[in-house]
């Protein structure tokens, strides 16, 4: 299959210094943590541990789909963040890799939050009521959280940089 | 005059050189990120994430929220006890047909037209199909689906198809009926035949998925793995056995954009409406016919006749003959029936895989017939051979692993 497209020019990268360097280090660290969490998800699912909860973080590893498949997606997100870290603030191609890496984390976190929401709306199976009480509903969002949900605020910070890029492109 | 593909591309180049004037173009972040989603190294993780999100939204909304959260409570807590209390004469034939088992505690196990029939179609299938079509439409309208087609092209060419075969494949996860119609997107008879056969064999529909999630949630991954291996293996074999072409196609990939809510709502409504018009009557009539066959002793006679094949060759109990006959009418019902038979985990997985790869449901059968009776007969011949061979293979693997 041949897909049509236009030749794209990528802006040359500028050397790493100042805010660009801080941003690159931030993205690289975020990528390392994401990769580590992804590997931990897979290892716990594979039986390296029975699952653990540490403070507000939990990895239960009880479900192939969430922890093995989701862990692979998290690990890929981490690799993309790391590979795009150098010159992420100045090179469009590198920034795109960071954006895609962040989107992978958002997808996992978003689906985790949706799962919490869907579990919190109905009442408990033993209750005759259909809808949960307000207290029960909010209790459904109490910690601990999955690694992806904990990483969400840190990856959302990247949005500001992306928005800046989009605005520059529009002007 | 017949031009070779190379000569055609040369002509395209000459025409493009004469008519197209390239200008300067500044790509945006979205353009470059979009391009990354069609390159294998970066595109495959994105595809894995998209399919993960697709499945996760499906299980959270359809499984946890709608079916387990509301529908089970409604049907098992109110509807089933109400019918059991008001319907006269629990020992009668009409009770057996319309309410089902008088001792059943859940609508799924009762297997009456008004109990399991309504629970399966409204309580399980409707939420599953609704959320499936919503996510499918979002992928389509955002521009991701054509990218997925480009990405999957190399893989699908190995089984005689091209990238756009991903459209009927994903559509088939909702309902095989529109998926069979969507095989017209493929260019050659060979491609259409392979796709139609693989759809009928290895792609479980939304109704089956919903029931699988309700009945065997812990084994859905293993069932999917069996189906995925079968899809690749038999696609590869069919692409080598069937004569015909597998041409390249030219795809214009649109830019990513936010789906328009109005169009999404319209598509969702049309698809769900069409599905419900076909699914609900088939579920109700399906249960009615199966119950009549049980009452007439036909199912028992077939189970006795087919016992050697089921027990010796497939390694499943002979009672699965009934669900396999029901599978021709509705596969979701068949899986619901399987859940009531005492089986080992291996037998349950093997029988669910068998139900899936067994004959397509009658609605799919009719649509396949519309595509041509010769193709249908050939597909049926392939189906029978594949069910026999693959069912035996799974049993052999089960024996080797010590689980069968």
Image (spheres, helix red, strand yellow):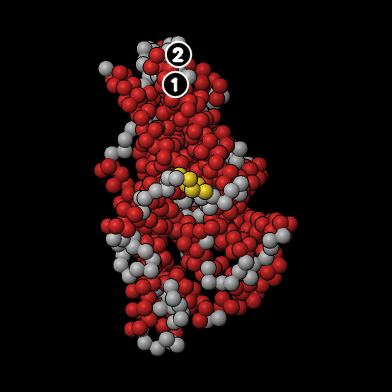
Which residue lies at the image location 62% right of the left edge and 54% below the top edge?
B382
Q: On what subunit does the disc labeled 1 rest?
A: A
Q: Report which quarter residue B353 is drawn in.
A: bottom right
Using the rendered image of the protein, determine whether residue A1 is visible from the camera's viewpoint. no
Q: If the image is split into quadrants, where does the C terminus of chain A sit?
A: top left
Task: Note whether B208 is above or below B341 in the view shown.
Answer: above
Image spot of residue B158 (x, y percent): 61, 37
Q: Report which quarter residue B272 is drawn in.
A: bottom left
| Residue matched to label 2 | A16
Residues at marks 2 and 1 on the same chain:
yes
- Label 2 vs label 1: CA separation? 8 Å
Q: Residue B166 bears which disc, if any?
A: none
Q: Residue A24 bears which disc, if any?
A: 1
Image spot of residue A161 (x, y percent): 35, 24
Using the rendered image of the protein, determine whether residue B342 is visible from the camera's viewpoint. yes
Image spot of residue A74 (x, y percent): 49, 38
| A93 or B201, nearer to the observer | A93
Task: Note whether B365 is above or below B145 in the view shown.
Answer: below
**In the rendered view, does B196 fall on the left or right side of B234?**
left
Task: Note whether B106 is above or below B34 in the view shown.
Answer: below
Which residue lies at the image location 36% right of the left edge and 12% below the top edge?
B23
Mark 2: which secondary structure? loop
Image spot of residue A164 (x, y percent): 31, 22
**In the rendered view, does A87 fall on the left or right side of B311?**
left
| B245 or A131, nearer to the observer | A131
Are circles 2 and 1 on residues that touch, CB within 8 Å?
yes
Which residue lies at the image location 44% right of the left edge and 84% below the top edge?
B93
Mark 1: which secondary structure? helix
Q: Earlier in the sequence, mark 2 or mark 1?
A: 2
Which residue lies at the image location 27% right of the left edge and 42% below the top edge?
B261
């Amino acid at each position: 299959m041949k897909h049509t497209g236009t030749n794209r020019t990528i802006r040359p990268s500028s050397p790493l210094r100042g805010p660009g360097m801080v941003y690159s280090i931030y993205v690289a660290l975020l990528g390392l943590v994401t990769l580590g969490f992804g590997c931990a998800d897979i290892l716990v699912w594979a039986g390296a541990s029975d699952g653990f909860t540490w403070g507000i973080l939990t990895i239960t590893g009880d479900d192939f789909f969430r922890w093995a498949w989701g862990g692979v997606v998290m690990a890929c997100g981490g690799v993309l963040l790391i590979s795009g870290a150098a010159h992420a603030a100045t090179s469009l191609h590198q920034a795109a890799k960071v954006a895609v890496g962040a989107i992978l984390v958002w997808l996992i976190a978003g689906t985790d939050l949706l799962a919490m929401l869907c579990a919190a709306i109905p009442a408990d199976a033993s209750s005759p009521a259909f809808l949960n009480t307000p207290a029960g509903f909010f209790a459904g969002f109490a910690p601990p959280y999955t690694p992806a949900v904990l990483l969400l605020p840190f990856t959302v910070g990247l949005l500001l940089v992306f928005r800046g890029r989009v605005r520059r492109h529009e002007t | 005059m017949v031009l070779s593909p190379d000569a055609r591309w040369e002509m395209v180049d000459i025409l493009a050189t004469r008519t197209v004037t390239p200008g300067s173009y500044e790509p945006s972040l979205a353009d470059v990120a979009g391009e990354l989603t069609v390159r294998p190294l970066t595109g495959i993780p994105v595809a894995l994430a998209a399919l993960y999100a697709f499945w996760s939204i499906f299980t959270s909304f359809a499984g946890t929220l709608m079916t387990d959260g509301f529908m089970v409570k409604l049907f098992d807590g109110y509807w089933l006890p109400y019918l059991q209390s008001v319907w006269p004469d629990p020992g009668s034939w009409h009770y057996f047909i319309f309410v089902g088992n008088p001792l059943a505690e859940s609508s799924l196990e009762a297997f009456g037209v008004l109990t399991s029939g309504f629970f399966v179609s409204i309580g399980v299938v409707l939420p599953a199909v609704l959320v499936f079509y919503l996510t499918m439409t979002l992928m389509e309208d955002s521009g991701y689906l054509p990218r997925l087609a480009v990405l999957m092209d190399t893989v699908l060419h190995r089984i005689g198809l091209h990238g756009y075969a991903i459209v009927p494949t994903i559509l088939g996860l909702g309902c095989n009926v529109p998926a069979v119609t969507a095989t017209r997107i493929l260019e050659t008879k060979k491609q259409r035949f392979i796709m139609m056969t693989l759809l009928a064999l290895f792609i479980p529909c939304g109704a089956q998925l919903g029931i699988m999630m309700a009945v065997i949630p812990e084994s859905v991954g293993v069932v999917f793995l069996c189906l995925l291996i079968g899809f690749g293996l038999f696609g590869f074999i069919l692409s080598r056995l069937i004569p015909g072409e597998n041409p390249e196609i030219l795809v214009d990939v649109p830019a990513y954009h936010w789906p328009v809510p109005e169009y999404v709502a319209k598509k969702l409504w049309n698809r769900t409406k069409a599905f419900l018009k076909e699914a609900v009557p088939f579920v109700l009539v399906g249960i009615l016919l199966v119950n009549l066959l049980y009452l007439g002793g036909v199912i028992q006679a077939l189970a006795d006749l087919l016992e050697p094949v089921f027990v010796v060759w497939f390694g499943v109990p002979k009672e699965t003959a009934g669900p396999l006959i029901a599978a021709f009418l509705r596969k979701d019902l068949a899986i619901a029936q399987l859940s009531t038979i005492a089986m080992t985990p291996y037998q349950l997985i093997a029988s669910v895989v068998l139900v899936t790869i067994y004959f397509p449901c009658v609605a799919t059968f009719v649509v396949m017939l519309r595509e041509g009776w010769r193709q249908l007969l050939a597909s049926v011949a392939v189906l029978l051979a594949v069910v026999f061979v693959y069912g035996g293979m799974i049993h052999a693997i089960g024996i080797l692993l010590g689980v069968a």
